[in-house]
Amino acid sequence: MKPRITITREVFDDTIDFLQQHCEVDANQADQPYTPQALAERLAGQDGLMCALTDKVDAALLGAAPRLKAVANIAVGYNNIDVTACTARGIQVTNTPGVLDDSTADLAFALMLATARRVTEVEAYIRKGEWTGWKLKQWLGVDVHHATLGIIGMGRIGQAIAKRARGFDMKVIYHNRSRVAAEIEQRLDAAYRSMDELLAQSDFVVLQMPYSPDTHHLIDAKALAKMKPGAILINSTRGGVIDDAALIEALKNGVIRAAGLDVFEGEPKLNPGFLELKNVVLAPHIGSSTEATRRAMAMLAAKNLVAALIGGAPPNLVNRELLPGK
Ligand code: DGY
């Protein structure tokens, strides 16, 4: 008998075709997010779950899913999943690292360029028909090239951002829980700094560390006050690493120059204060959203799930202590 799986959100047809070769698939192509209760009911007899960051996989949900053996997240971040509870139940958890690094790094750069050169402000101005002609001092921005870029979180995506920065002749500094290998620092021409040094020295601060209780509100009013007055803050990782209310105050009061945000605390709701500000560029969590990358993420999640359920080690197992022999 094939294992039974539930997919919580719409995926591409080729992902479903692949999964149907191996599993009985309960898909949600209408893409109406399930309430926790609806998802719990669907999982009562299921062996596998393919989910997204919009689904909370916690102890209560696991309690309603006695047969569940594997959870495949269609994301590299997995803060929506209680991995400890899954591990205690022997449930394998997988994510999708690697396939989204370049697209997410591109978006971080798009936000840097858009904030520095005021792209969304000038677009709105032109659309309103307000442009009457060229002026020397019109819409002055700041340079990205030759500026100092501070990256917090030097994993794969942070490194992809650092690689792009070389093409802009930027000076790259970084902070990470632990220093990366000397070979990586040399290849990327990136220098390690303490948090405070990085905040004080960077023209652009890009957040790319995972969200966890340790990184909750890492950028709060105190951290913002340590940044250069003309600095620009970019968040392309997860909402919650910034105290959004404190950021709005900092943007209003000129504590920093601007922010480019792809993620928000409590998204898709966002603090209405952001909508009143001109010096913020907002995006709806699209860091990895190119057709090629989202297809690759969905297929990688599907392959992880099938490997976990049919045998063999899933390529991207998060709770590696569940590997046989560990
Ligand atoms: C991820 O992979 O964690 C992204 O945020 C999903 O869009």
Image: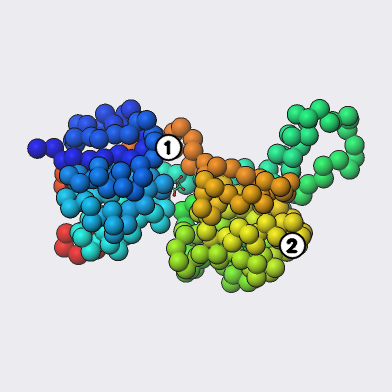
Marks 2 and 1 sit apart, C-alpha to C-alpha, by 36 Å
Q: 152 and 124: which one is in front? A: 124
Q: Quadrant of the N terminus?
A: top left
For residue 223, what is the image quadrant?
bottom right
Mark 2, other Cα within 10 Å: few <14 / some 14–19 / many ≥20: many
Q: Residue 191 placed where, x, y %?
A: 59, 65
For the residue labelled by badge 2, is the local secondary structure a helix, a strand or a loop? loop
Q: Residue 179 bears which disc, if any?
A: none
Can you tell which quarter of the image residue 41 is in? top left
Residue 198 lies, in percent from the top left, at: 63, 66
The residue under the point 52% across, 59% down is 240
* Marked residue nearer the N-terminal end (2 or 1): 2
| Callout 1: SS | helix
Where is mark 1, residue-wise? 294
Which residue is label 2 attached to? 255
- Decide if residue 239 is on the left or right side of residue 277: left
Report the residue at 46% width, 32% height from top. 291
Confirm or deny contact between disc 2 and disc 1 (CB under 8 A).
Answer: no
Disc 2 marks which amino acid?
Answer: Val
Inspect the image, locate mark 1, and give the three-letter code of the amino acid beneath it: Arg
For image coordinates 74% across by 46% down, the residue present is: 278
- Which residue appears at 61% of the width and 58% of the height? 244
Left or right: where 279 falls relative to 33: right
